[in-house]
Amino acid sequence: MIKRVFVMFVCLFLLFFGLGTTHSYAATNQLIVINKTTNNLAFYENGKLVKVFKVATGRKGSYTPEGNFKIVNKIVNRPFYKEHIPGGDPRNPLGKRWLGLNARGTWGDTYGIHGNSNASSIGKHISHGCIRMYNNQIEWLFPQVKINTPVIITSSKKSFDTIALASGYKVTKQTNGPVTPEEPNSNILKKGSHGSAVTLLQSKLIAQGYVIKDEKGIFGTSTENAVRNFQKDRRLSVDGIVGPATKKALGIN
């Protein structure tokens, strides 16, 4: 009788808590997949691919760890301890949000998904190992993600759905074609932008004495250099990206 009760208890325990990665996913209903080959991050919820974001990963292939991990902590305005820069400081390279990973024997204090003070780095292989996102995009993702959400980091030419399925996660395949990476805040102007907003930006810079050789309405290298010089002169964060602070200094609404 005691043996039978013990066996029933074990079976109920396994049924309730689950075994392996698949059940862990079922418990959180979320999944994050990061592909270092394309520098894209996919966020799944309830088996559906919700959004894809452009990210930055390690300068060398070995810098950003690959494997199956979990989100183990969530921090708003995490300080950059190495350089003693407080959280929320515009100079802080970790941006405004931090999602810590349990990678390589660490527990969310070394590797993470975070924002970044240098928006121009996103999409590149440039970090020391963490996964960088645009600040406004990590601010969207941060409240959505639950502690213990599984994170797969890999280098692959396969689709996100294929990567997820191969790791034992049940996903609903997309019927409307692939989900493309979310654009950063449309209010931000950077190299590659074009249109009337760029034309206005160029006119503001030229009026203040900055030389621009790019075609009118095209944000090229010359416009980027002019923005950087303007930011340096105004003691702003020098990244060549025209965000809220630079627009305000230029008098652009």
Image (spheres, helix red, strand yellow):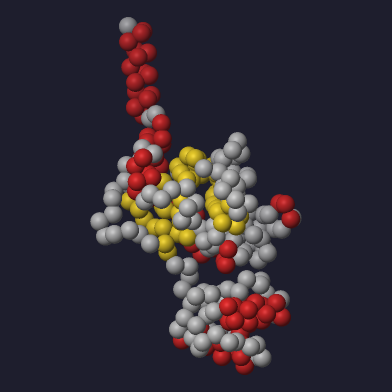
- Callout count: 0
Where's residue 236, x and y in %?
Answer: 67, 74
Q: Which residue lies furthest to the left in this view?
A: 175
Residue 65 shows in this picture: yes
Vertical position of residue 234 compared to residue 103: above or below: below
In this rendering, position of residue 171 left or right of residue 111: left
Where's residue 215, x and y in %?
Answer: 51, 87
The quarter in which the N terminus is drawn is: top left
Residue 32 shows in this picture: no
The residue sitting at 61% across, 65% down in the picture is: 118
The residue sitting at 74% across, 55% down in the picture is: 84
Where's residue 3, x and y in %?
Answer: 36, 8
In this rendering, position of residue 213 left or right of residue 32: right
Q: Considering depth in this image, is 76 or 54 the residue closer to the camera? A: 54
In this rendering, position of residue 1 left or right of residue 214: left
Q: Residue furthest top?
A: 1
In the figure, residue 240 lies in which quadrant?
bottom right
Q: Considering depth in this image, is 101 or 215 the residue closer to the camera? A: 215
In this rendering, position of residue 24 left or right of residue 128: left
Where's residue 238, x and y in %?
Answer: 66, 72
Q: Residue furthest bottom?
A: 207
The residue sitting at 63% across, 44% down in the picture is: 109
The residue sitting at 60% across, 87% down in the picture is: 212
